[in-house]
Image: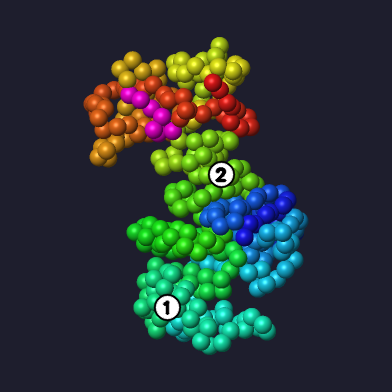
Amino acid sequence: MNVKIEKLTKVFPSRDKKGSEVRAVDNFNLEIPDGKLVCLLGPSGCGKSTLLYMICGLESPTEGKIFFGDTDVTDIPSEKRGVGLVFQNYALYPHLTVRQNIKFPLENFKGDAKLSKEEMEKRALEAAKLVQIDGLMDRKPGQMSGGQQQRVAIARALVKMPKVLLMDEPLSNLDARLRLQTREEIRRIQRETGITTIFVTHDQEEAMSISDMIVVMKDGVFHQAGKPQDVYDDPVNKFVANFLGTPAINNFEGRVKDGGLYIGDERVLDVKGVGDKDVWVGIRPEGFEVSSDGKLTCELTGVDVMGRDISVVCKNKASDAVIRAIISAENDVDPKSTNVRFNVKPHKTYLFDKNTEERISFT
């Protein structure tokens, strides 16, 4: 089921008379392809959960439309949209067994959709097998780990055979090891079922690793959407470039003069087609090459050996943050040196307008 969002806006009233309204989602447009896993990604408070709840029907939009396929579902109640929702805190009934928790949504089916006890049992077992908890059907949530409880929550959402599966930060309550394992399971389940899945997270590594498409948001506003690697390689603005990547992109104040990019007094790169101006310069950690005659000089503060790679930690007067360069361990960097010199890779270097922070293309 493809999902289409047109000019969607959600405004919350002020909590007091002196405060202003809060535009949690602002004129949002997006089309989510059928059968894809899409991550809504952005910092806390950017409106991604509000957007998810409007798609689900738990929140009503102030303006705009939501379509499932060709059907306008904007005013259709949540229970009639054919969605499954997985909450951050699992939301399981502690007094019910796993079997009863999974079957619970089926017991609310009415009329022609009502199922027999045998059919409910069959579908509950199929959903449990899909998330690999069919051996735990008689346990209660309190007898299970966080990862197992999350699987129950996913099975409960899937048992309804939803058109769209919605997940609101489903891994945030798990420890690091369980997060990795469970996100791999979510990806496997989504591929096996082919259900269009919308996944909310603030963790860019999580989003990059499992999604077919990421949607980057800030302050309720759409910034960029696309395949994870495409968005990482081709950010439209400084915010997107900064938000994606571990370690984060390195930012410098720079200027373009006579077709050259200067960081401080050093001309580090030719940038044809850009007029003379002050710019922000973003260089990915993997965009540095150590060279004895490199064009960018930095003050060396440390060398972290990570096995296959080395993290060179340094400073530059044009940046107010620590610079991290990730280079191959085959490079020889003397940690006792005062300075280190780099050449920068053009395809890992980005220019942004000093005022608007929009990307500036160069050749």
The amino acid type, in three-letter code, at marker 2 is: Gly
Q: In what quadrant of the picture does the C terminus appear?
A: top right
* Mark 1, secondary structure of its residue: helix
Asked whether 355 or 52 is in front, the reply is 52
Q: Which residues are magenta?
A: 284-290
In the image, residue 278 lies at what x, y percent?
A: 57, 21
Q: Estimate the spatial distance between the alpha carbons at disc 2 and disc 1, rounded to whole Å.
A: 37 Å
Rendered position, 260 above or below 185: above
Which residue corresponds to mark 2? 226
Q: Quadrant of residue 335?
A: top left
Residue 259 located left or right of residue 313: right
Asked whether 165 or 8 is in front, the reply is 165
Tell me if mark 2 has few (under 14), some (14-19) or many (20+) residues whose alpha carbon lies within 10 angstroms of its own: some
Q: Quadrant of residue 249?
A: top left
* Mark 2, secondary structure of its residue: strand
Q: Residue at x 56, y 87 (%)?
A: 116
